[in-house]
Amino acid sequence: MLKLKFEKKFDVIVLNHVLEHIPEITDVPQKLSELLKQDGIIIINVPNISGTIAQIMMQNWCQMAPFTHIWFFSKKSITKIFGKNFKKIQFKTNTNCEPIGFLPLGIKLWVKTIIVVFANFLNKGDELHVVLKGPNPN
């Protein structure tokens, strides 16, 4: 069980690459909704297991850290976890994790960079940015 106790509610809560490390993930939505003001927002960044780079790299994806990352998320799993506790969920993706660049460092880096550019354009990056708006009244 998550043990977070605060005397006041918050306008904004930021979880930057935190969720993938929390064993009690099912406790998180309720706890966050209790801590958030009615018109507040929660900003979450997590690795996106459904991203293009993650799907291509699979076990070699840089975010595949089995002893560190307990969970991997997608838009579908975030919606399932947080959907009943929050009024609105918004998504965007980006690729920040994999090295990119067009320096003459080899064809592999060039190919990966092209994939990253297209993945970002298609909103299929390997980092999922989530905004949760206002908790649903209990």
Image (spheres, grey):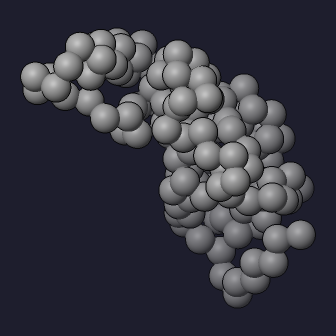
Q: Quadrant of residue 118?
A: top left
Q: State the residue at coordinates (66%, 82%).
A: 8
Horizontally, residue 87 falls left or right of residue 85, namely: left
Can the viewer see residue 30? no
Image position of 120 with respect to 32: above or below: above
x then y, percent, for residue 106: 20, 19
Q: State the residue at coordinates (11%, 26%).
A: 103
- The residue closer to the viewer here, 19 or 66, is 66
x then y, percent, for residue 54: 54, 25
- The residue closer to the viewer here, 6 or 67, is 67
Numbered label tally: 0
- The residue closer to the viewer here, 2 or 115, is 115
Image position of 50 with respect to 137: above or below: above
Task: Name the outermost residue toward the left.
Answer: 104
Q: Quadrant of residue 109?
A: top left
Q: State the residue at coordinates (52%, 47%).
A: 45
